[in-house]
Amino acid sequence: MIEPGPSDTLLGDWYANMHEAEPPLVLLMSERTLLPIVIAANPINEIVINLCEQLAFVLHDLGVDHEHIMRELQLMTRCEVGKTVNRRVTRLMSDSMYHLGHARDDRKLKSLAQVSSYLATFPLKALAFRTAGEVTRDLFATGG
């Protein structure tokens, strides 16, 4: 397997984990800001398209400028798959998976974008007790 090159997006590499429930979902997390995005697991061949679609909603919800959102999505059109490099992200994903299980039961969260935005509101020790949403908003405000 050829190792992927470094990411040229502000959010960096993305890590994915399957949430085995009905219907199955995929939790993705940005390596740089730990922003969680939840998408439908099927069809799996559209994972990048679904990630970009949900990410656009969440970034808009965070108040990120439309131009910055479009630039990030444009850079994400190229996808490379490789082995997990950052174990810290995979450990943090397990916490988000726990919250995802509870968020799915919350009837007020009607869309996957709402679930993603909700998951981005939890303070994380890895982010000095800031939320992934705050860190992501600040990253786009300063341009990286």
Image (tube, rainbow, N blue to C red):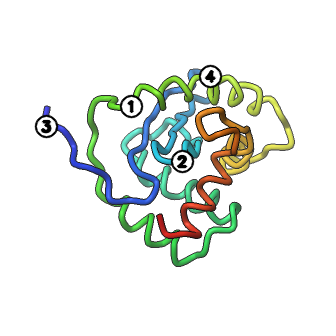
Residue type beneath disc 2 = Thr
- Say whether marks 1 and 3 touch (CB < 8 Å): no
| Residue under label 1 | 86
- Per the image, label 2 sits on a secondary structure element best described as loop
Q: Nearer the viewer, mark 3 or mark 2?
A: 2
Mark closest to the chain's N terminus, 3 or 2: 3
- Say whether marks 3 and 2 touch (CB < 8 Å): no
Whether residue 93 is visible, yes or no, is yes
- 76 displayed left or right of 105: left
The numbered dot on residue 21 is 4
| Residue under label 2 | 33
Residue nearer the viewer, 40 or 77: 77
Check the picture and name the quadrant holding the N terminus: top left
- Per the image, label 3 sits on a secondary structure element best described as loop
- Per the image, label 1 sits on a secondary structure element best described as loop
Residue at point 53%, 58% (across, down): 53
Residue 99 at x, y percent in the picture: 71, 28
Residue at point 63%, 46% (across, down): 132
Against 2, residue 111 (above or below) is: below
Q: Nearer the viewer, mark 2 or mark 4?
A: 2
Residue 144 at x, y percent in the picture: 47, 63
Q: Nearer the viewer, mark 4 or mark 3?
A: 3
